[in-house]
Amino acid sequence: MRSIFGIIAKSPFTSINQHTKKVHETATQLRPLIECFTEGDWNGTMKITRQIYKLEHQADQLKDEIRDHLPRSLFLPVDRGDLLLFLREQDAIADSVEDVGDVLNMRETPTPAELKEPVFALVDQVIRTSETWYSAANELTTLQAATFTGNEAERVLKVVDDVNHQEWEADKLEAAALKSLFTFEEEIGAVSVMLWMKIIATTGRVADHAENTADLLRLMIARA
Amino acid sequence: MSVAEWLLILSVLAGFYMAWNIGANDVANAMGTSVGSGALTLRQAILVAAVFEFGGAVLVGTHVTDTIRSGILETAMFEPSGPLGPDGPLLLALGMFSALLAAGIWLQIATMWGLPVSTTHSIVGAVTGFGLIALGVEAINWGQLGTIVMSWVVSPLTGALIGGAMFAFIRRAILQNDDPAAAAKRIGPFLVALVAVILVLSFIYKALKNVVSEPPFILVVVSALGIGVLAAVATAAFLHSHQPKNLTPNAYVERVFGWLQITTAIFVAFAHGANDVANAVGPLAAVVNIVTSGLTELPDQVPVPLWVLGLGGVGIVIGLATWGYKVIATIGKQITEMTPSRGFSAEFGAATTVLIASRMGLPISTTHTLVGSVIGVGLAQGMAALNLGVIGKIVNSWLATIPAAAIIAMILFVALRAVFI
């Protein structure tokens, strides 16, 4: 066969969309994970962390595969660097969820009853940010079909704005949770406080990376 | 049987084999984009290709055929009074047969190795090769050959330009519109009219020339525009009565282009038949000419016999039916990334370029032009990813084809000359 259509390469956007879905699946584990931990269910915490490990690893494999298929000779409708950064930030969402699992498994740390409220306010806001990131990132293939312009781009930009706003809310809730944490320093001791600081900060990072990923979508649209 | 009869039969077989090859490989490259996007099913693609390749070959195939049979070589040097003496016409016939066979052999090798070579480049290389060995550098019409080779560079660029411009227009007027679905419905009929007008213009001169010697300009314009309006009205009516529900605006746009792409698929098949049939029947027409005048003289340029063009058309269709359909199916699966709006633009760019080249008598490579158009659509941000590394491979096969086909033709010609003379 003398076909010349090797010129049409496999769409990286379709593969990246699979990565998006895998990362989102990882992120949905965040709430059950922290619930188990705050209830003192160390076994459950361990189980969910293992599940997160598995999902994060699958996301990593997808990421590596996509990178392997993005040689410089590939001509893309968006900047290759933007696309690789998008992939890295998206992968960092799953990494951060995994980090939360790691911290939770370090030490059996008690949760003061009144700390739950500010912590879950933060967790829920982080999940909201992540869900909004997902609804934007999941549009990548459709965006490509629409050549990153028009109504479709406008729609995605609005969702990206939402992600930005929600991450900002998450930041505020993170600060509030930390502030609340220090009212329990007598009750749970310095080591537990230290660990909780790490838990709260790492949870906040999930939203940070969701925002960064969404911002890269904005960049791709702006440059199209 | 006489030498003349043998030569005629063998040339018919070699010409038929070349036509088969075009149908088996080149047509698939031309039709693959329509199957890949889902605009046509495999069965529909074969039907469209069979009808319009044949139509293009028989109705508009003569321009390029004339170039191949008598444009590349200084045929006057093969006159019995020329440097080769009374054997001149026979040598020209033998040479054209060698060229046909050589191009066929090279294509067979390229197909085995999966090299993206062009049928057109093969036959032009082969004719040049035999001319060089028969008479040396003076036998070649270098001006014409230079124009042909230039056209091989220019045609993919032109395809890229027209295909890219078409997609840029679709992007601006439809994809960026506030209501892409309504825009597609409004603009679709005009695009179909454009395709219809170009198609009609391309063969109306030819078809009418047989009836009226020089068709009046007004008649040509009126009939082309009339058919254009008719096509637009029919498309508008079709789009009005076919309004699928539950589709996103984008999906609806692609659905509309899936329908519109049927017209560019026809366009490509017609243009491909018009240009590429010459690769098979150009040398054959030369042999038929010489043999029918008894091998003793070089006949004046007579029109390419219709049965020769018909033979080429039939060969293409048989190549398609026996092998090409498998290649179309394979290519169709490979290039699903090409959605109908992109396929429409690429096919429009390629077919327009090929038809212009055909009118100018320039044998260009349809498939290379189509690759150019796909790249043009990519540059207009239409493609998800283009593997530009393949361009190097295409250029390499391009550069290898000329000497390879030429050398095989030289060897065959020398052997045949030893046998017959």
Image (spheres, coloured by chain):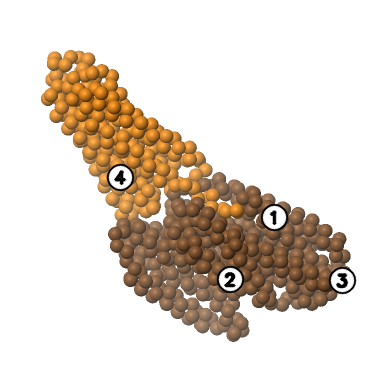
Where the C terminus of chain B falls, by quadrant? bottom right
Tell me the mark number nearer the camera, choosing from 4 and 1: 1
Q: Which tag, 2 or 1, sits closer to the chain's start?
A: 2
- Subunit of mark 2? B
Q: Which disc number belongs to residue A136?
A: 4
* Type of amino acid at the residue the image marks with label 2: Phe
- Above or below, A6 against B84 in this view is above
- Subunit of mark 3? B
Tell me the mark number nearer the camera, choosing from 4 and 2: 2
Q: Which tag, 3 or 2, sits closer to the chain's start?
A: 2
* Type of amino acid at the residue the image marks with label 3: Pro
Of residues A29 and A191, the one drawn nearer to the viewer in this rendering? A29
Where the N terminus of chain B falls, by quadrant? bottom right
- Subunit of mark 1? B
Q: Name chain A's colour.
A: orange
Instruction: Find disc 1 in the rendering and name its residue.
Output: B106
B220 to the left or right of B416: left
Spatial separation of the CA atoms under disc 4 and disc 2: 49 Å
Residue B163 visible in rendering: no
Instruction: Find disc 2 in the rendering and name its residue.
Output: B54
How many C-alpha atoms fall within 10 Å of the one at disc 4: few (<14), some, or many (≥20)?
many
Spatial separation of the CA atoms under disc 3 and disc 1: 31 Å
* Type of amino acid at the residue the image marks with label 4: Ala
Which element type, helix, strand or loop, lies under badge 3? helix
Mark 1 and mark 4 in contact (Cβ < 8 Å)? no
Mark 4 and mark 3 in contact (Cβ < 8 Å)? no
Residue A51: x and y in percent read: 32, 30
